[in-house]
Image (tube, rainbow, N blue to C red):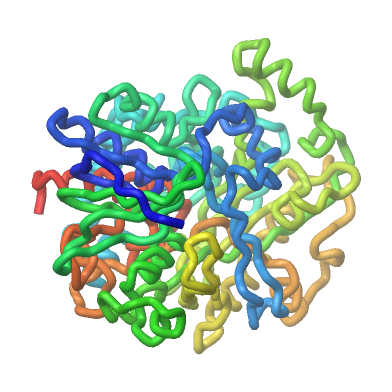
Amino acid sequence: MPVRSAAPAYDYIIIGAGSAGCVLANRLSEDPDVRVLLLEAGPRDWHPFIHMPAGLAKLVNRKGVNWDYDTAPEPQLDNRTLWWPRGKVLGGSSSINAMCYIRGVPADYDDWAARGATGWHWDNVLPYFRRSEGNGRGTDALHGGDGPLAVSDLRHVNPLSRTFIEAAQQAGLTRNDDFNGPRQAGVGLYQVTQKDGARCSAAVAYLRPARERPNLTVETGALVNRITFEGGRASGVVYGARGHAFHQPATREVLLCGGAINSPQLLMLSGIGPAEELRAHGIAVQVDATDVGGNLQDHLDICTLYHATQRVTYDRISDARIAWDYYLRNRSGAGTSNIAEAGGFVRSRLAPDDRADIQFHFVPAMLDDHGRNRLAGDGYTLHACFLHPRSRGRIRLASARASDKARIEANYLSDADGFDLKMMVECARISREILKQPAFAPYRGAPIHPARENLSDRELEAFIRAKAESVYHPAGSCRMGEDAASVVDPQLRVRGVDGLRVIDASVMPVLPGGNTNAPVIMIAERAADLIRGRIS
C-alpha cells in the first residue's frame, strides 16, 4: 500500500489513547501554541456498556474494544494459554477495567528509585497522584479533591461484599476504609473511578474536556505500523487508517503510550530491540536494545469459588432490571457496581519486608475463566494475587507486521527458587480460610474451585497450575533506569535515539503493590511536566 504524506506537521504525536495517552493529550494541548495528534487503533468509547459500571461484565467478549491477547503456552501452568484482555478503545484499559482505585505504597516507589528510576520515589510521585485525583471524600495530605479523575465510594454494594469484610475480620484481618491512606493492609470496600455512578475512564476524565481544543486532533481506527527516524531522531510515524497508509511527521517528539504489549512491539517494528530478533524478521536495526520486551511482569491470580445457597448474587440478576435502575432511576442499583466491590491487602507469613504481599478482590458472582465460562446457579468468588512476583517474561515479535499480535511469554512461576508458587499457595490458603468463617454460613454452599476443601499444599499447587489466570496488570517490558541496558532513562526517553519517549506501564521497573491504572495516570502526569521542562 503506498504511503501518503500527511500535512501539516504536529509538534507531538501520541501513539495510543489509553490512560497515559489521554493524560498527555490533555496536558500538552493546554499550551495553545502546541499542536498535538493522538492516534488510537480502536474506536471511540461510544458503547453504553463502557459507561455503565456493571457493563464491564458484558465487555468480556466484545472484541471491538479489546485487543484480545493470549499468552504463549505457559510451561509452569500446564502449558495453558492465558487470556490477556487489554483496552482497544479511547481510554484503553481504563474503559474496560473494574475501576478499583489503588496506588500501591510509598515503599513501592522508593524501590523504583533504588532500582535506577531516579526522581520517581514516593515524595516525587505523590504530588502527581494528588493532581490527578478528584476524590469525593475531599482533599488531604494524601488525596486530591479537584483533579480530573473522579474517585468515589460505591453507590451500590451487594450484601455478600459486606459479608466478605466481616469474614475477613473474623479471620484476623483489620478493617480499612482507605487502601490509599496511611496504611494499605486490611479489608474493606474499594473506592472506584466513577463520577455520579458512571465510569470515569481516562477518556472521560482527560480527553473529553480537551476534545474541543483546536490544537488537538484525535484519530481513531489508526494503527501505527512504525516510527520513522532521521539522523537518529524520531521524525514521525507511519500509520494505517480508512484504508490508506500515511506518514505523519512530528517536529518535537513522538510519545509511545501503547502499554506493556504494544509499546515494545512497536519499538521492535521500528528497529529498536534485540538485533538478532529484528534481523530474523527482516527489520533494519536502528538501536540494538536487548532489553526491549524483557522484564515483563504480571500479577498472577487464583480464584476460589463457592456455590451460594441464597439468590443474592449477581449471577442471575436481570439485565433489564439493571438497565431500568441505571438509566431510568438516576444511575442507581446494581448497574453502578464495579462487581469487584470489596477486597483488601494482607502481609503473609512469607513476606520478606513490611509491605502487604497479597491482594484480594471479592466478587458476589461465580467468575470462572474471566467470566467467559458461565456456571449454573448462584455463587461467589474470591480472587487473590501475589503482589511482588519474581518471575519475568518477554514480549517477542510474531512477524514484522503491526497487525499481527506480538508473542507474549509471561513465564509465570518461573523464578529459580519457586517462591512465586509458594506465594500462590499462600493466596489460595488464606482465601479458603476467609471463606470458611462463620459470616458466610448463611450463604455457603458446595465448593466449586477447588471442588474439595481438604487439600494438601501439593494439591493446591496442582490447582494453581490448572486454574490460575492473569488479573490484568502487565508491566515492565520497557524498563526505566539509569543503567545502559534500561530501555528508557528516568525522563522516559528511549536510549539510543532522540525525540522518542515511552510513557505507560511498560516503563515500571517492578510492579507496584496493587492495581496499575492509577500509577499509569501518575506516570503520564509526571511525564507531561518532564516534556514541558517543568521538572528534570
Q: In this view, does 501 lie above or below 411?
A: above
Quadrant of res 280: bottom left
Residue drawn at x 26%, y 75% as measured from the top left: 286
73 horizontally vs 419: left or right = right
Image spot of residue 405 (x, y percent): 55, 64
- In the depicted structure, whether residue 160 falls above or below residue 449: above
Place residue 105 in its image quadrant: bottom left
Residue 100, visible in the rendered structure: no
Front in this rendered view, residue 507 or 28 = 28
Tell me if I can see residue 272 in this picture.
yes
Q: Which of 205 and 62 is in front in this view?
A: 62
What x and y, as percent, mark residue 482? Answer: 18, 72
What residue sits 31% from the left and 73% below the top? 272
> How many numbered tags mark residues here?
0
Q: In this view, does 413 lie to the left or right of 204?
A: right
**Picture quarter with the C terminus:** bottom left
Compared with 152, 525 (above or below) is below
Q: In this view, does 318 lie to the left or right of 135?
A: right
Question: Residue at left 78%, top 37%?
Answer: 313
Q: Which residue lies furthest to the front in this view?
A: 2
Frontmost residue, 503 versus 359: 503
Residue at horizontal 65 percent and vertical 33 percent from the top: 54
Q: Position of residue 337 (x, y in %)?
A: 63, 31
Task: Residue 94 in the image: state x and y as whole percent.
Answer: 48, 42
Q: Does residue 520 appear to the left or right of 491 in the view shown?
A: right
The one of 258 and 126 positioned closer to us in this rendering: 258
